[in-house]
Image: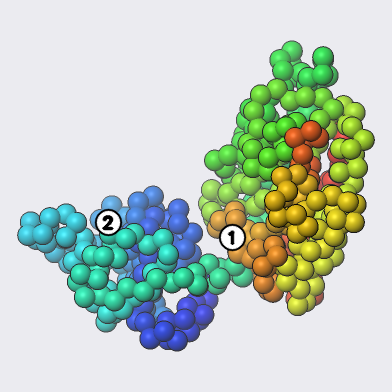
Amino acid sequence: MQPDLSRLDEYLSDRDIDGYLVDAASSDSTQRYLSGFDAPDPFVTLYADGAVHLLVSGLEYGRAKSESHAATVVRPAEFGLEEYREEYGTAGARDRVRADFVADHGVSSVAVPERFPVGAADGLREQGVEVAVDSSDVITEIRSVKTDAELDHVRVAQRANEAAMAAAEALLAAAAVEDGQLVHEDEPLTSERVKTAIEIALLEHGCALDETIVACGADAADPHNRGSGPLQAGEPIIIDIFPRDKSTKYHSDMTRTFCKGEPTETAKEWYELTEAALDAALAAIEPGATGADVHAAACEVYEDAGLPTFRTDPTTEVGFIHSTGHGVGLDVHEKPGLNPRGEELQPGQVITIEPGLYDPDVGGVRIEDIVFVTEDGYENITDYPVEFVVE
């Protein structure tokens, strides 16, 4: 997939800067997107005059030539790394190689991401290269609008996500209730056991994740508490899965809240309100809508029911205490934001809608779908039921 970098050309031209430079491993999504190359160790990518150029180790040279977006691929040895090292030491040698690399493409000024290594920036400046920090995060803005191929990558990750959610729900369904706890195969059913089932299902579908959320009771009242220990009957259990496809590196994100046993009346009410907030937020996605509009639609449902939100009480620790959603792609959390500052949504963006309510005395309830913004509204690619009580 060759990205459309015309906006990057405009950014550089408007600022009279020769090129854009990234020094990071491919775990950095800007690096992955710009270079099209997957490597575990840092390497240098230069974008200049409409072309991508890579400076990589000899270990990665062959793969970079065949797999990356690059017009040219070079190694530090081609700029006399060893000779520089003998004269200037390891750090000084790296600085001179980077400077020679950009100069080889007629570049004397570069824009860099905000998280560019400070040592590399200082070294380039010492070699006479002008370095300007890109505070606008232009590449993240560019990659928020997906190509058809990228949208397909997210669809594949979402199908894996749904298989993992089904595996988790199946464990809850198979569990018995004994003394207020869930029991499976004569052992307490724990958050950890459910997470293992989720990870196995994801691996079987070509995806993986570092962490997931299976949180019950008071744990679920903290939106990003991963959850631990035995799962309780009659309490909401938030399961939030955000896998990454191992091949494409694109993510999905989905949350469901389940209850095994009889939930409290408050929990039932919260679930119904959260489903209504989800529907209201989805209905607000239309041509010209902003992330702020979508967030407001979700807030209004809760506020009309007399529940606090950050909009009505910025200091509240209970109620609706986060944004309504976020972009998804190479990062699981990226632009655009669905919050009070959310800008106009654009066709091709991938966003989550995830309203929720939280209180340690009740637990937590959250429902999250993942959707594509389209020319006339949205396409909900989530194909998983919204049902609270697990039979």
> Residue 160 appears at what percent x and percent y?
67, 46
Colour treatment of the image: rainbow
Q: Could you classify mark 2 by the number of other residues whose Cα lies within 10 Å: few (under 14), some (14-19), or many (20 or more)?
A: some
Name the residue beneath numbered marker 1: 334
Q: Which image quadrant for residue 131? A: bottom left
* Sequence-earlier tag: 2 or 1: 2
> Residue 307 appears at what percent x and percent y?
84, 49
Q: Which residue occupies the extreme left position in the image?
A: 87
Indicate whether 267 appears above or below 145: above
> Residue 136 appears at what percent x and percent y?
50, 72
Q: Which image quadrant for residue 342? A: bottom right
Q: Could you classify mark 1 by the number of other residues whose Cα lies within 10 Å: few (under 14), some (14-19), or many (20 or more)?
A: some
Q: Residue at x 23, y 65 (%)?
A: 123
Q: Residue at x 21, y 60 (%)?
A: 94
Label 2, label 1: how far apart the Cα atoms are: 29 Å
Q: Residue at x 46, y 60 (%)?
A: 32
* Closer to the camera in the image, 209 or 149: 209
Indicate whether 38 appears above or below 132: above
> Residue 269 appears at what percent x and percent y?
91, 42
Q: Amino acid at mark 2?
A: Ser
Q: Is residue 320 left or right of residue 29?
A: right
Name the residue beneath numbered marker 2: 57
Say which element carries label 2.
loop
Res. 343 in view: yes
